[in-house]
Amino acid sequence: MTDAVQQVAAKPARTGVISWHSTPRRVATIYLPLACFVVVLLFPFYWMTITTLKPNHELYNYKDYNPFFVHSPTLVNVKKLLFDTEYPQWLFTTMSIAIAATVLSIFASVLAAYAIQRLRFRGSQWVGLAIYLAYLVPPSILFIPLATMVFKLGLYDSPFALILTYPTFLIPFCTWLLIGYFKSIPYELEECAMIDGATRLQILRKITLPLAVPGLISAGIFAFTLSWNEFIYALAFIQSSEKKTVPVAVLTQLVQGDDYQWGALMAGALFGSIPVALFYSFFVDYYVSSLTGAVKE
Amino acid sequence: MTKFTRRDSIALGLGAAAVLSPLGRFAKAAVPVADVPAPKFEIEDGASLRVLRPAKFVPADEEYFNKNTKKFTDTTGIDVRVDYQAWEDLRPQTAVTANTGAGPDVVLGWTDDPHLYSDKLVDITDIADYLGKKYGGWYPLSELYGKKFGTDTWVAIPFGGTGGPAVYRKSWVNEAGFDEFPKDLDGFLKLCQGLKKIGHPAGFALGHAVGDGNSFVHWLVWSHGGFMIDENQKVTINSNETIEALEYAKALYETFVPGTQSWLDSNNNKAMLAGEIGLTQNGVSLYNAFKKSEDPNIAKLAEDVYHAPMPIGPVGRPTATALVVNAMIFSHTEYPNAAKAYLTFMMEAEQYDTWLTASSGYWSQPLKAYSESAVWSSDPKILVYRDTMKDALWLSYKGPISEASAAVVADYVMLDMVASAATGSATPQEAAAEAERRAKRYFKS
C-alpha cells in the first residue's frame, strides 16, 4: 500500500493534463459558471440603474447611443420620482405593512407549526396538509370575497386591510416551512426539558425557538418579500393615492395611458428593491442554514 | 356666482355660474348650447362623494379634472375626493366596487363595464336626456355604451373616448411613393411594402396590447366584413370574410418591423420615437411625445408626424374602435342626487370644454356640440381625433355588449387569432376555427 502510494507520488505529472486544482479547471468549473450566474442575476439591477440615469432622448435613440451604457447621466428621473410623486410615503407605507404582516404571520405560524409538529393531535398531519393547500389558492380568486370582509369590517382603504389579509397567504407558507424546520430539531431536547418540569410554552420559548432562529428568519424573509411585492390585494383594497403601496402606486403615477415614464419607473423599481436586497444580505447565513439543515443530532 | 350649500336644491345649470371665469367664457363661446331647463335634485344632507377614474393621459387631464371638481365643491359645498388608478388596474377595482357594494360612489370605468354591472347602477336617464338635448345629442356609440342594452334607460354617462388612427412620418410615406395616405386596403398594403423597401417599415401591435392591439385587429377584421358575434350573439367569426382578413394580415405582417407579435401598448410609441418605424396606429399621445420631447432632434420631427383615418375595407365604412370612459353611479351610494349633480356639472360646457381643450385631443367628446370645441381648431393635425366617438364601433360589434362579449375581448380572442395567422403559426383557417372554439366557450350558456 505504502509502496503503491510512493510509486504514484514518484510518477511525474503528465504533461497536457489539467490537475483538479489547476487555475484553468477552477476557471472552467467555478468562476465561469459563477460569472454567468452573477451576470444573469445582476443584469436586471444594472438595467434598472442605467435606465434611471439616462435622459429620455438616450432611452429612445439606439442608433447614436449604446443602450448598455449611460452617456449623459442625469438625476432628473430620481428627482421626478422623489419630489414629483409621493414615493417616500408609498415606501414607508409598504415597509410598515410588510413588517406588520410578517410579524403577525410568523407569530401565528410558529404556534400552528409547533402544534402540528409536536403536539401530534389526531389529524394533525391532515391539518398541516390543508394549511399548505390553502397556500395554493390564487389571490385572484380570493380578492373579491376578501373584499367583502374588508368592507364589512370597515377596513377598506386603510393599511389594516392589507396587514390582515396578507397573512391569508403568508401563514400557510410560513407554517409549512416551519413544520419542516421544527421536524429537524431533536425531540429529545424537549423531552429533557419536560423531565425537568418545563411547560409546553416554556419549551417553545426557551428551547425550540432559539434553535429555530434560522428557520424563523428564512420564513420572515419570504413573508417580507411576498408582502413587499404583493399587487392584487393592494390594488383592490386601497383606493387613496397616498395610501397605496409601491408596486401599485408607481404604475398609477408613472404610466400615463400608453406613455410609460421609464426612467422614473425604473428608479422606483430600483429603490423599491433595495430594502429587500438589504434584508436578504443581512440574514443570508441564517437563510442558507435553514435550507441546508438545522440542529444536528 | 351663487353659493349653494349641500342642503340646497340644486338646479343643474350650476356650471353657468362659471361663465364669468375667463376659461368659462372662452368655452361657452365655442360650443353651441340649447336652452334647456336643468333638472333639479334634492341634495342629501351631509353629502360627500368619492370618485375613481383612470390615471391621467396628460398632466392637464388630471389638473383640469381636479380644478372642475374643486369648482363643484366651491359651488355646492359637497366634498368630492377623486382618486386615480392605472388604466389596466381600473377594472379590478371596478369589479371589487360592484361585487362588494361598497367603495367609490362614482366610477369612470372602461367601455363595457356599465353593461357588466347595469343592475348595480343608478338610473341616470334624467341627466343623460338633459345633456343630450342641451349639447346637440349623443353620438350613437355614446348611446350604445350609456344605455342598458335593449332599453332606453341610461346607466352611464360616456365621458370621452380615445381613438387610434394611423400615425405616420409624412416624408417617408412620400418617399415610398404616396402623396397622400391611402384610403383603401390595397393602397395600405402597397404603402407598407413601400415603407419596408425604403427601410422604414410599419409596426402594429400584435401582442396583448389592450389599446393598440385591439384597435388594429378589430379594424382589420371588421374592415373585411368579419365579426365575432352577430346581433343574436351567435359566434360568427369563422367566416369567409375573416379568412380574407387573415390572409391580408399575413401579407401585411411581412412588411412589419420584427418583433411586433410581442408588442404591448408602449412599444410602438418607443419604436416610432426611435425612428425604427414609419407607420403605426395610436392615440394622439405619440404626436405629443414628439412635440414635447426634451431632445430637440426628436421634437423637430413632430412636423413630419401626421395622422390619418385607418383605410376603409370592402364593407365601405370606417371600422375603427374607441376606448371609451363611462361615468357610473353605483347604487350603494348614499348620495345619488349629489352624484348626479356632480356628473352633470362636469359635463357642462364651462367645465367639460376647458378639460377637453386642456387634454389636447387625448379625449374626444361623446356629445355632438363639443365637436365645435376650440381644441379641434388648435392644431389641424389632431382633427382626425375629433370624430373618434362619431364613427367608432364597439368591441363586440355586431352583437350586444354582455359579460360573455367582454370576456372574449379580455381573453384577446380576436388578437390571438390575427397574430397567429399573421405570424404563420396557424393557417388563417386554423386561426379562425380556434377563435370560434374559444369564443363559443363564453357564449355557451
Image (tube, coloured by chain):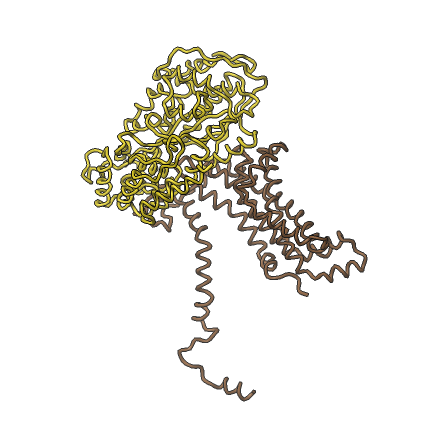
Chain in yellow, by letter, is B
Horizontal and vertical percent for residue B51?
51, 27
The answer to whether residue A185 is visible is yes
> Chain A hue?
brown
The one nearer the camera, B245 or B37, is B245
Q: Quadrant of residue B433?
A: top left
Q: Please indicate whether residue B279 sits to the left or right of residue A276 in the image.
A: left
Q: In which quarter of the image is residue A215?
A: bottom right
Q: Please indicate whether residue A213 sits to the left or right of residue B113 in the image.
A: right
Determine whether B385 is above or below A112 in the image: above
Q: How many marks?
A: 0
Residue occupying the far bottom of the picture: A3
The one nearer the camera, A2 or B254, is B254
Q: Please indicate whether residue A61 sits to the left or right of residue B67 in the image.
A: left
The one nearer the camera, A26 or A135, is A135
Residue at 46% from the left image edge and 54% from the top image edge:
A42
Horizontal and vertical percent for residue B185?
24, 36
Residue at 55% from the left image edge and 21% from the top image edge:
B335
Q: Please indicate whether residue B107 sits to the left or right of residue B138 in the image.
A: right
Determine whether B24 is above or below B406 in the image: above
Determine whether B120 is above or below A261 in the image: above
Q: In which quarter of the image is residue B43?
A: top right
Horizontal and vertical percent for residue B281?
32, 36
Determine whether B46 is above or below B215 in the image: above
The answer to whether residue B297 is visible is no
Horizontal and vertical percent for residue A295?
66, 62
